[in-house]
């Protein structure tokens, strides 16, 4: 493999998305010469957002894809937010295949910035209940950390990326360092009051990575206030939402310590038998197919959960014939995800003299009310609920044409409320990913096989959400309420987690409390692969907090000569 003085660094970060961007920022700020490897193309803030300022009428099919494209891409076209306006940030199905032993929708974005360009942006903090519940109620192993260990790192991340929200004083969803929230509209406020009155349940303003009112730290990044256009997934020219392309990577570049290399497909981590550490990373240039070896003192795996599993499983040596650090056949197991199957919607009368301003990019959140600190249901775990109220101008327009149709859809219509769940799932050894023994990709790397499924706990949780959601809407005065179980395959939530989980015991986990591999301590994993359990809150900001915490520790270890 090609190797010279230009291939030696203090640190290597594999992946440039939400957690990879944070690893780069923190390591570069601490003076480490850092290489970020991204398998996809380069994307630069503002320069590479081709649809950011276009309107629906600027697209041939008003944002929809052609029938030919849909038939050729049945997987990616199911992804939330996918359209003709955002397809440049998603990969096409045939370009990067994988093997589905059971149906699993693996949604990917291979470019600098990864899925930070298309994420949902919800940023609730985990409560201590979520860290402690799996071990306490025996549906998972004990986390090696608690909320207190990451509380200050949450604040560190929130201040830099900009998160809007409100201080609500709820233990089940701890408060953070927030910019002003996007206010509830009149029907959402009505729903909030009815829920509190009848059930004692709490609806809060969405905690979203949107600059509702930018601060100096955000202006210093070249970002400004969110314009409430809700076109975030196209890439925002204002930097109104957080992505690594608009925020952490440019910040890392300012230090002079960053080397960013797109088109770099990571094959494996190379283990040095004599030192007992990883020596570096084997890369295949995506275009030339040239093999290159990059050397570093520490390596951070942030390729996204399943790709991190794939790379580590493919990192074989005499010491680790089943994958780097994989002494107990744990790697690739305990894959989990969030449960998104349930949704409920209905109509509500009144409020016809009210409307709202702009296209709010955040959603109100109904805080989890199931199994909070105790086991009270016939299922374990809880669920967060996202909701929104809106006016539908298309009501009654189905049979209209011409001027009648135009007049109808230009007049605010009936108010609707929609709710959908984000539920915790149980990490199980039988839910796993592994390498194909027969099939390889275009670069000679084994394809990933997914073997992940739902269980009885999931079915009970979905049923409870549908029942409770319907009852809550009706209690608020909704009618024609419909409850729906999508039966979608796991993975479509885009919150895949686990496979390289944290834990206290090397016999039952792969990473310690600092996200280091127990058996190879200069390799850190801080993306979704590190998760011990899923909780019910959105996970991305926890990845960022864990990354900031781990990079701070790693930099200290490098400077002291221990790594």
Image (cartoon, rainbow, N blue to C red):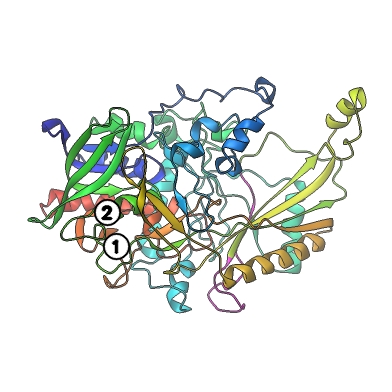
Q: Residue 511 carries which label?
A: 1
Choose between 287 and 351: the one closer to the eye.
287
Q: Position of residue 157 (x, y in %)?
A: 40, 47
Horizontal side of 261 relative to 69 (left or right) equals left
Which sits in the foreground, 140 or 18?
A: 140
Q: In the rendered image, which quarter contains the N terminus? A: top left
Mainly helix, strand or loop, the magenta region? Answer: loop
Q: Check disc 2 and report its element: helix, strand or loop.
A: strand
Q: Which residue lies furthest to the front in this view?
A: 438
The reply to whether the magenta stretch includes residue 372 is: yes
Residue 478 visible, this angle: no
Q: In this view, does 17 lie above or below 224?
A: below
Residue at (35% x, 31% y) in the render: 250
Q: Residue at x 89, y 27 (%)?
A: 407
Residue on which the image places disc 2: 524
Residue 563 image position (x, y, % from top left) = 14, 53
Is residue 458 visible in the rendered image? The answer is yes
Cβ atoms at labels 2 and 1 below 8 Å apart: yes
> Which residues fall within the magenta stretch?
362-382
Tell me if 296 is positioned left or right of 348 in this view. left
State the image coordinates of residue 419 (x, y, percent, origin top left).
69, 54
First in sequence, mark 2 or 1: give its number: 1
């Amino acid at each position: 493999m090609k190797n010279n003085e230009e291939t030696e660094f203090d640190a290597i970060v594999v992946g440039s998305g939400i957690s990879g961007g944070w690893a780069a920022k923190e390591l570069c700020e601490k003076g480490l010469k850092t290489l970020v490897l991204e398998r996809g193309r380069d994307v630069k803030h503002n320069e590479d957002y081709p649809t950011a300022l276009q309107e629906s009428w600027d697209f041939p099919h008003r944002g929809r894809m052609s029938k030919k494209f849909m038939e050729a891409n049945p997987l990616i076209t199911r992804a939330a937010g996918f359209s003709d306006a955002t397809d440049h940030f998603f990969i096409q199905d045939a370009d990067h295949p994988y093997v589905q032993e059971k149906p699993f929708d693996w949604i990917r974005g291979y470019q600098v910035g990864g899925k930070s360009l298309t994420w949902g942006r919800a940023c609730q903090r985990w409560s201590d209940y979520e860290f402690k519940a799996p071990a306490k109620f025996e549906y998972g192993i004990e986390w090696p950390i608690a909320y207190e260990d990451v509380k200050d790192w949450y604040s560190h991340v929130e201040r830099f990326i900009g998160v809007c929200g409100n201080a609500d004083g709820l233990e089940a969803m701890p408060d953070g360092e927030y910019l002003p929230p996007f206010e509830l509209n009149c029907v959402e406020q009505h729903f909030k009051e009815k829920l509190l009155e009848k059930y004692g349940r709490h609806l809060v303003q969405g905690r979203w990575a949107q600059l509702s009112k930018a601060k100096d730290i955000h202006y210093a990044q070249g970002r400004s206030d969110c314009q409430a256009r809700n076109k975030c997934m196209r890439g925002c020219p204002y930097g109104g939402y957080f992505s690594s392309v608009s925020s952490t990577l440019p910040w890392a570049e300012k230090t002079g310590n960053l080397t960013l290399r797109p088109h770099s497909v990571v094959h494996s981590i190379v283990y040095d038998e004599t030192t007992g550490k990883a020596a570096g990373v084997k890369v295949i240039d995506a275009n030339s197919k040239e093999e290159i070896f990059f050397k570093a003192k520490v390596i951070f795996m942030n390729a996204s959960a399943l790709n991190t599993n794939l790379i580590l499983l493919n990192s074989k040596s005499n010491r680790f014939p089943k994958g780097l650090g994989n002494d107990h056949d744990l790697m690739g197991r305990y894959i989990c995800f969030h449960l998104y199957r349930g949704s409920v919607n209905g109509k509500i009368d009144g409020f016809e003299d009210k409307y709202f301003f702009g296209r709010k990019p955040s959603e109100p959140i109904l805080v989890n009310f199931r199994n909070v600190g105790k086991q009270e249901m016939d299922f374990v775990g809880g669920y967060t609920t996202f909701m929104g109220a809106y006016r539908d101008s298309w009501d009654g327009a189905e049979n209209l044409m011409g001027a009648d149709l135009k007049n109808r859809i230009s007049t605010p219509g009936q108010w609707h409320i929609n709710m959908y769940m984000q539920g915790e799932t149980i990490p199980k050894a039988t839910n796993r990913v592994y390498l194909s023994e027969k099939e390889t990709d275009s670069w000679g790397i084994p394809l990933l096989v997914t073997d992940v499924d739902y269980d009885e706990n999931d079915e009970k949780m979905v049923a409870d959400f549908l029942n409770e959601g319907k009852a809550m809407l009706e209690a608020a005065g909704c009618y024609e309420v419909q409850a729906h179980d999508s039966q979608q395959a796991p993975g479509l939530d885009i919150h895949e987690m686990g496979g390289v989980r944290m834990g206290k015991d090397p016999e039952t986990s792969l990473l310690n409390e600092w996200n280091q591999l127990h058996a190879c301590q200069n390799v850190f994993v801080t993306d979704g692969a590190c998760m011990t359990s899923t909780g019910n809150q959105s996970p991305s900001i926890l990845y960022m907090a864990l990354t900031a915490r781990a990079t701070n520790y790693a930099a200290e270890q490098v400077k002291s000569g221990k790594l």
